[in-house]
Amino acid sequence: MIRAPFDRLRVPSKVGGKVQRTPSSEKREKKMDKDMVGVIIETLKEKNIDLVVTLPEDPTYPLTEQIRQDPFFTAVTVTGEGHGISLCAGASLGGRNCVFITGIAGLLVGSWALAQMGVLYGIPVFILASYRGDVSDRSGISGDQLNMFNQVGEPVLSALKIPYRIVEEKEKLKRKLLDAHAACQGYSTPLVLLLTGDVLW
Amino acid sequence: MVNRYDCLTLLASWLDEHAITVTARGPNAREWAYLRPKGANFHSLNLGMCLSFALGLSLAYPKRKVVAIDSDGSLLLDTSSLVTVAGVNPPNLLALVMDNQSYADMGPTATATHADLEAIAKGAGIPVTGTIRTEDEFKRVVPKSLADGGLSFFVLKIEPGKARVEVDSRRLHGRAMKETFIENLLRHPDYPKRVGR
């Protein structure tokens, strides 16, 4: 019989008669880089982007949580990315500076809304998305999911005619944020900045 | 049941020039565009988009009344947006759902049989909800809601059919409609100043 090595078994330990489980935060290989959280928040404030809409996801959770606790921002947690994108489109068209923070999965869920706010209407929606499935994804999700995101993420954005840029260097994050926000307004379309693991962790 | 056109006629008379409205695709948009030719009106949003788009506008214009004129088929596509709207609880959003219990002429929606949109909205946490079946109820409930402010949600059980009104399609659909909407917003006294690059 083949047995798994002990160091690969996940057995809850007992302390004082109580089962100790691993907190979910410890399961993450790394948390989002604090400096990058700071750069994004600082840039959002510089551009007076004070409405932040998100459906929390693991890689960007430290960012969205810090935003939620900052009184400068109005933070809206949505229950679905589709109507989150629609919400941002309404606010943005109304003249309020807004950002939608999500991941590749959220973009896939929101594709119906992206098609309309992009191709149909041409409404600027500024989107920051963690690049799940990129080779630098260290979030710990399973390989088959990584592969799925990797295979379909960018092709879906291309098919929807949504401009996107990939950020791979921490040093360039601020400039990319500024450029992407300006381009989003200028193009008058949803625009996605994909944050790779090189930037997130 | 109430008549959609009659109710929308009343609604148009109750809104001031600075109110902002959003309609779902179909007869809601056509009849509303005919009845409210001026002002900021975003028309013909596709399934599932109307309420959340209106929520975004309500966050951009917190001092003005924002009205979403949605439909049963549209809202049923994304009822979870009700949870989001309730969570935000804006001070200025009135949601009216024109419930004809059918997908145009293509058969019944779930509200014809087992689904109760008002109950779903109430369960989502929306503070003021109702189902309107007579014009008297509409006259009693909606002006009060407009005067009180806050977030409210009403389902109107409407008669089948639609009014025969002529509206230029450029006022109803796509980018031409959007441009008209923006022109109206730019003249709006509350339009936020854009911060440039």
Image: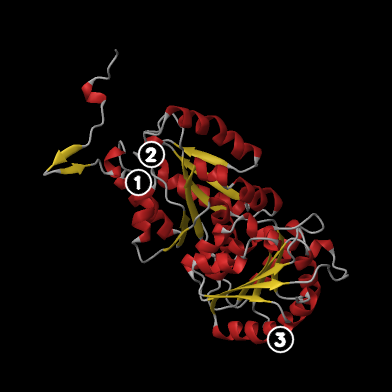
User: To which quarter of the image does residue B37 belong?
Assistant: bottom right
Residue lying furthest top in this view? A1
Q: Relative to A27, say whether B61 is above or below.
A: below
Give the structural element (helix, strand or loop) at label 1: helix
Q: Which mark is on residue A36?
A: 1
Observer able to see residue A95:
no
Disc 2 designates what residue?
Answer: A199
Name the mark nearer the viewer: 1 or 3.
3
Task: Have a look at marks 2 and 3 and say if they share a chain.
Answer: no
Q: Residues within 10 Å of mark 3 (few under 14, many from 20)?
A: few
Residue A72 point in image, percent of width and height: 38, 65
Image quarter in which the C terminus of chain A is found: top left
Q: Which mark is on residue B136?
A: 3
Residue A189 point in image, percent of width and height: 62, 51
Work out whether residue A26 or residue B17 is closer to the camera in this orientation and state it.
A26
Give the structural element (helix, strand or loop) at label 2: helix
Q: Residue at x 42, y 59 (%)?
A: A46
Question: Quick check: A32 left or right of B71?
Answer: left
User: To which quarter of the image does residue B16 belong?
Assistant: bottom right
Q: Residue at x 52, y 65 (%)?
A: B85
